[in-house]
Amino acid sequence: MKSRTEHLTLDVPARRGFVNLTREVERIVRESGVREGLVLVNAMHITASVFINDNERGLHHDYDVWLERLAPHAPTDQYRHNDTGEDNADAHLKRQVMGREVVVAITNGKLDFGPWEQIFYGEFDGRRKKRVLVKVIGE
């Protein structure tokens, strides 16, 4: 069995944002030499997410608006977590909704996606460096 592990470092300059990781994950899968297997892509921070969906600007805007309505950042004193001096309780909640990680099948050396599927990193408390784990395993 082959495996490859790589950590991507992301630094989203805004509090919230979405980054398409598909090409980087494809590169890591290609370099791994795995033809049949799985790739795990995991946000390694509790205020960020990895998810699969369409690469469509309107959809990303809709996610941002929907998540902000669901768990608004302000007023920050509405959250008990922020009593500790933090101001990111909303980011924890947004991450819970959007998910921690994705697993994608690798078939014939390529990501085995459905139509329009791509891998995204969702940042909900940005403005500093964070990591994403990419782990490929297979034959």
Image (spheres, rainbow, N blue to C red):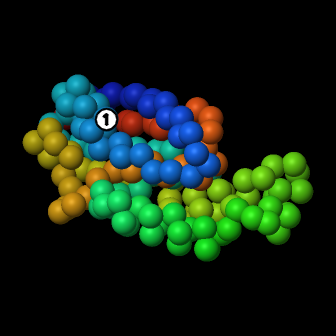
Total tally of numbered discs in the picture: 1
Q: Is residue 65 above or below residue 101?
A: below
Q: State the quadrant of the N terminus.
A: top left
The residue lying at 66 percent from left, 57 percent from top is 92
Give x and y (percent) for residue 72: 68, 68
Q: Is residue 109 left or right of residue 87?
A: left
- 38 and 84: which is toward the camera: 84
Confirm whether residue 46 shows in the render. Answer: no
Give x and y (percent) for residue 65: 53, 69
Confirm whether residue 38 shows in the render. Answer: yes
| Helix, strand or loop under label 1 | helix
Q: Which residue is mark 1?
A: 24
Give x and y (percent) for residue 78: 82, 69
Q: Quadrant of residue 22?
A: top left
Q: Is residue 11 left or right of residue 50?
A: right
The residue lying at 81 percent from left, 58 percent from top is 81
- 41 and 20: which is toward the camera: 20
Give x and y (percent) for residue 133: 45, 36
The amino acid type, in three-letter code, at marker 1 is Glu
The residue lying at 61 percent from left, 74 percent from top is 69
Q: Is residue 35 above or below residue 71?
A: above
Q: Is residue 94 above or below residue 18?
A: below
Q: Is residue 132 left or right of residue 22?
A: right
The residue lying at 29 percent from left, 53 percent from top is 118
Q: State the quadrant of the C terminus.
A: top left
Q: Residues within 10 Å of mark 1 (few under 14, many from 20)?
A: few
Residue found at the far left of this picture: 108
